[in-house]
Amino acid sequence: MSTAALHKEFQQIAGPENVFSDASDLLTYSYDAALLPSQPPGLAVRPTTLEALGRVIRLCNDQGLPLTVRGAGTNLSGGTIPAQEGVVVVTTALNRIVEINQEDLYAVVEPGVINARLFAAAQKQGLFYPPDPGSQAVSTLGGNVAENSGGLRGLKYGVTRDYVMGMSFFDTEGQLIKTGSRTVKCATAYNLAGLMVGSEGTLGVFGEIILKLIPPPVASRAMLAVFDRVQAASETVSAIIAARIVPATLEFLDNFTIRTVEDFSGAGLPTEAAALLLIEVDGHPAQVAEEAEKVQEICRAQGATLVRPAADEAEKERIWTARRAAIPALARLKPSVVLEDATVPRSKVPELVRFITDLARRYDITIGTFGHAGDGNLHPTIVFDQRDAAQERRVRQAVEELFDKALALGGTLSGEHGLGLSKTRFLAKEVGEATIAWSRRLKRAMDPKGILNPGKIVGA
Amino acid sequence: MSSVTQLARLLTELDEQLITCMRCGFCQSVCPLYGETGREADVARGKLALLDGLAHEMLSDPHGVKERLERCLLCGSCAANCPSGVKVLDIFLKARAILSGYLGLPPAKKLLFRQVLARPALFNKLMSLAPRFENLLTKPVDSLLDTSCARFTSPLGQRHFKRLARVPLHRLEPPRSTPAGASGLRVAFFAGCLIDKLYPGVGRAALKTLEHHGVGVEMPAQEACCGIPALSAGDTATFSKLLSHNLARLDPAKFDYMVTACATCASTITKLWPLMCGSLAPQAQQQAKALAAKTRDVSQFLVEAGLVSGEAPAPMQGAKPLTYHDPCHLKKSLGVADQPRRLMAANPAWRLREMTESDWCCGLGGSFSLEHYELSQQIGGHKLAHIAASGAAAVATGCPACMLQISDQLSQAGRHVAVKHYLDIYAETL
C-alpha cells in the first residue's frame, strides 16, 4: 500500500486529527526519558477508543509495520523509542477509569489513565492504590504495567505486578484476549496477565486493566535517622526487618546526595552525615505507635547519631520533601543524568554502596546514591555532560561494571525501570542464552511478524 | 551554507539551556494545553525537543516548529515545576525571536506592533476613539460583567468581551509626582495597557491604596506597553522600542519601588526586561535591570514594606463568598500567592472560599486566545466549573488579562458572578 493510502486508512480508523505524519510531530515521538539516541517513527496515531486501538494494531500487522505503544513516555530504558518507519500508538486519549468497585476492591482502567489520577479517584472512595513510581504524576497505568513499575512503597506493599488482577489485551490480529478476573481467586486458564506484566509492549497491547485496590492505612509515622557510617545505616535496615517490622518506606541517602539536596533546598539536613535513613511505618494507630518506638530503638542501637521522629504532618512533609528533592537536586548539577536501578538482595546494600563510591573515584565521575534501601533497589545517579565524549565513555563503562557487580551479588539488572533498549545486551549475563532463546520463541508465537515493539527486552 | 544551517547556528545560542532538559516529561502533569490535547508537541518537553532538532539539523522545517512553538500559553507552569530547573520561558521567548527574525513577522502583526503598539501616543488616540464605535458593532450582554458580544458575524466569533472604558485611566488620573507620606516610600506606578484602557477602576483602586498607606507616587505621562505582546510574537524590534520609550520616562533613582496591579506586566518587567534588553546601550540595559529589581506586584509591595497589618478581621456575619484565581504570572513566575489573599482578608465583607486548582491557568495566554480560541475556551472551561463549584458571588484575581478571560467565560455561561481585582476588594475598606 502507498504511504498516502496507508495514512488515509489510519485516518479513517482514528480520525484525521489523531494521525501525525509531519516531521515535527514525529520528532516529538522519537524519545523517552532514557539517555539514548532518538528515533522518529514513520507515523504516530492517537486512537480515542479501544475499538480503534484494535483496528490500528490489525492494520499494522497486515502491513508488517513495527508498532510501539507510548503512554507518557517517561520510562528510563528506551522502551518507547520506536523502530525506524514504525508506528507509535499514543494511549493518552484512552484515559477512562471504567469502574471503581468499593465492594470488591478493584478498579478497571484504560491504559492511558495516569497513575496519580487513579490514586486520587480511589482515595476519594476511601481506597488505596499503592504503587507509586517516581513518575506517578505523569506516567500512565498501561506504562506502569508494561514496565512492572515499583516505587517507594515496594517494601511493604509490593509493585505494580502485585496489583494486576487481570486484563484484556489485543493480539497482533487485533483480537481481544481476556485473562484474569475481578475475583480475588482465579485459577482459570494460563496466567497470561502475569506474562503481560513487564512485557514492555512486546507481546500484546493492553485494552482494559483490572487493578486491585486495598483499604488505606489509618495512621502513619515518619522519622529520620542519621548515621556516620554507611555500614551502620545498611545494618539498621536489616535489623528492622529482622525485628519483624516492615515499614511502608525505608529510603536511603548517601553523603553526596545529602549535601546536594541541602545545597538545593536548605532543608536542614546534616551535611556531615555518611548516610540518612528516611523511614515511615503505617497501619493501625496502636501498631504504628509501637513500631515507630521500636524502629527508633533499633536505629539508636545500631549507632545512629540522631533519630528524629516527625512531630506533625508538616515535619513529615519536610522529611519526604528532602527525599523527593534528590533527583531535582542532582539533575541540576550537570546537564545529563543516568538514573540506574540495578537491585541487590537487601543484605548486600552496604557492599554495593561501597562499590559505587569506589566506582565514582576510579572513573572520575559524579554519582549520588539514594533509593529504596528496604528492598535493595538503590538509584545510583550519575550526572555528567553527554557532549563530552570521553566522559560519556567513562560513564558507560562504569555502568557496565555496576551491572556486573549487582549480578555478582545475586541481584538483578533492573528493579523497576525495565530493560527496554538500554539493558538488552546485558540480559544474557543474568539469565543465560537458553532463557533468551526460549523468550524469543515465545515472542515469535505471539507475534509472528515481529511487529510488537521490536528490539526491546530480548533484542531483535 | 544552507539557510537551515544558518538558522541552526542562531539556535546554538540556546544549546546550553536546551541540554538541561532531561526529558523526564514531568511537565505533562501541569501543562494546561497538554491537559486538553495529550499531544507531545504541545508540552514543553516536546517543544524543547523540536528546538533541539532544529538546532542540530534533525529537522528542516522552521515553519512547522514555529507553529508548534506558538501553541503555548506562556503560563510558565512547566518551568515552575521542572525538576531540572530548565528555564523554559526564557528559551521559548528567545526561540520565538530567532524564528520570527528568520522567517519574518506575519504582515498583520507587523502592522499592529510596529505602526500602532510601538507608538503609544497613536495607540492611545485610536483606543480613545474606539468606544464610540463599540456600540455600533457590539451589543451589551451582561451588565454585572460589563461584557458585550458581536452584533453581526465577526472575526471575534462567539467572544463576550469586556467593554472598553469610556475614559481611560491616563485621563482619569493625570500624571503626577507626589512626595512620600507616612510610609516614607515612593513608588512608580506602572498601569499597563489593560488597566489603562479596560479596567481603569483597578488603577484607581491601586492609587487609592497607595495614597491611603502614605506612599508617594510617580506616574509619568504616556507609559508604553510593557512589551509582552511583541515578545511573544518574537518581535524584538518593537519590544526594544517600547522598552526604550518606558526607560526614558522611568528613572529608578526617583523611587524606591515600581509597582503594578497587572501580573503580566509585573512578570514581564521583572523577568523579561533584563533577559531581552541585550540590544540596548549598556547604560539602558543597566537601567532596565535596576527597574526590574525594583518592580513588585502591589500586594507584594504592601506586604514586603510592612504596610498591611498582620491580623485580619474575622469576616462579618453575612459576608459574601469570594473566590480567588491565582494568575500564572503572579504565582508561577513571581511566587506571589499569599499576599493578595492577605489583602482580601482585610475586608470583612467578604469570606474567601478557595476554588479547586486555583492556580490552573485560565487559558487566555494573550495572543494564544486570539489564535487558538477554541482551545483557550476549553482550558477556561475548567476554571469556569471550579468558580461555579465554589459557590462564590465574586471571583477575584490579580491580572486584568485573567479578568478578561474569566468574564468571557462567565458571561457566555450566563453565570452572574462578579469579576474583580483583589485591589477592588481591598480598596472597599479604605
Image: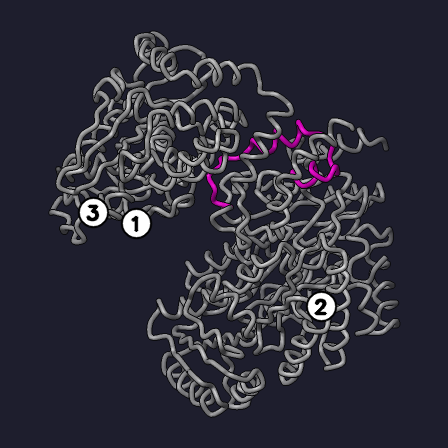
Q: Are discs 3 and 1 located on one and the same chain? A: yes
Q: Does the magenta segment cover residue A37?
A: no
State which mark lies toward you, 2 or 1: 1
CA distance for labels 3 and 2: 60 Å
Outermost residue toward the front in this view: B283
Specify the quadrant that holds the N terminus of chain B.
top right
Three-letter amino acid code of the residue under disc 3:
Ala
User: In the displayed structure, would residue A135 be above or below residue A93?
Assistant: below
Disc 1 designates what residue? B338
Q: In percent of the image, x 49 and y 69: which residue is there?
A: A214
Mark 3 or 1, nearer chain start: 1
Dot 2: chain letter? A
Disc 3 designates what residue? B345
CA distance for labels 3 and 1: 11 Å
> Helix or strand or loop: what does disc 2 sit on?
loop
> Helix or strand or loop: what does disc 3 sit on?
helix
Q: Are marks 3 and 2 in contact (CB under 8 Å)?
A: no
> Helix or strand or loop: what does disc 1 sit on?
helix
Return the x and y of residue A71 as percentages of the image width and height.
Answer: 64, 50
Which segment did they paint magenta?
B51-78
Q: Nearer the viewer, residue B364 or A356?
A: A356
Three-letter amino acid code of the residue under disc 2:
Asn
Q: Is residue B201 left or right of residue B277?
A: left
Disc 2 designates what residue? A191
CA distance for labels 2 and 1: 54 Å
Regarding residue B2, the answer to whether it shows in the image is: yes
Q: Quadrant of residue A8?
A: top right
